[in-house]
Image (cartoon, helix red, strand yellow):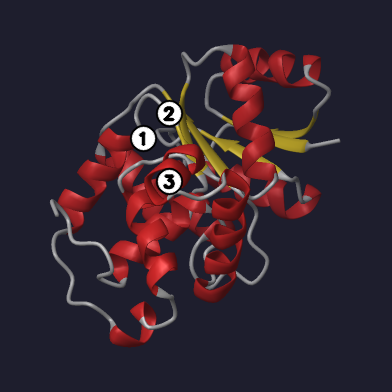
Amino acid sequence: MTRVVLVDDQAMVRAGIAVILESEGMQVVGEASSGADAVRVVRRVRPDVVCMDVRMPGGDGITATRELAGPGVADPVPVLVVSTFDLDDYVFGALEAGASGFLLKDAEPEVLADAVRRVADGDGLVDQSLTRRVIDEFARRRGPVAPDAAAVGLLTARESEIVTLLCRGSSNAEIAAALFLEPSTVKSHLSRIMTKTGARDRVQLVVWAYDAGLVVPGA
């Protein structure tokens, strides 16, 4: 059973998400109304996923995400950002802080449940309707980065192709079609790539690719 902590300053929002997730066989094991409270609750109950709002009084979700899942965290907890805002600084800050995915609060219940499951399984995601927009804007804000030869050298030519397509917002099926591969082969490649790079999921692999200069914004 997937164990979830809900973080939102509005009790009604937490209650609504809890109903959706519990109806899908998941267990809500903790709630918090601020980032600071979230860190304490998550460290105590160690859930499989944290559903995190990013704009909250008394401690923002970005700081909490960095403390729970950011670079250097020895035992990170996957964070799914669930927000009313799509393309703002909070979203990009959360991705850089280590969030594994992003979803709008008006997503359909089955989409929310699926997102939580995927993040728990290590298949981080961004809301499919926003994937390309978020990645494009993320890249634009990061700007060009000089290639890190050591980092880029970790990947084979085929793996670099796959990561490049991933950074364009392509799904496994779209990557497979573009490279004439089976989707299962793409999934296996991505698993090996994440092991090589230390990325926990697809979202953080995109962040790694831009940090390493493997992908050039606008190219």
State the residue at coordinates (36%, 61%). 161
Of callouts 1 and 3, the N-terminal one: 1
| Count of picture labels | 3
Q: Return the residue nearer the eye: 107 or 184.
A: 184
User: Which residue was labeled with disc 1?
Assistant: 131
Q: Return the residue nearer the eye: 174 or 47.
A: 174
Please, what is the three-letter code of the amino acid marked with disc 2? Gln
Check if mark 2's residue and mark 1's residue have beta carbons within 8 Å: yes
x, y (%) of residue 123? 60, 46
Check if mark 2's residue and mark 3's residue have beta carbons within 8 Å: no
x, y (%) of residue 39? 62, 51
Callout 1: SS: helix
Please, what is the three-letter code of the amino acid marked with disc 1? Thr
State the residue at coordinates (55%, 61%). 189
The label shown at residue 207 is none
Residue 21, by quadrant, is: top right
Q: CA distance from mark 2 to mark 1?
A: 5 Å
Residue 38, relative to residue 162: is it above or below?
above
The label shown at residue 175 is 3
Of callouts 2 and 3, the N-terminal one: 2
Callout 3: SS: helix
Judged left or right of residue 60, residue 8 is right
Q: Return the residue nearer the eye: 181 or 91.
A: 181
x, y (%) of residue 179? 40, 51
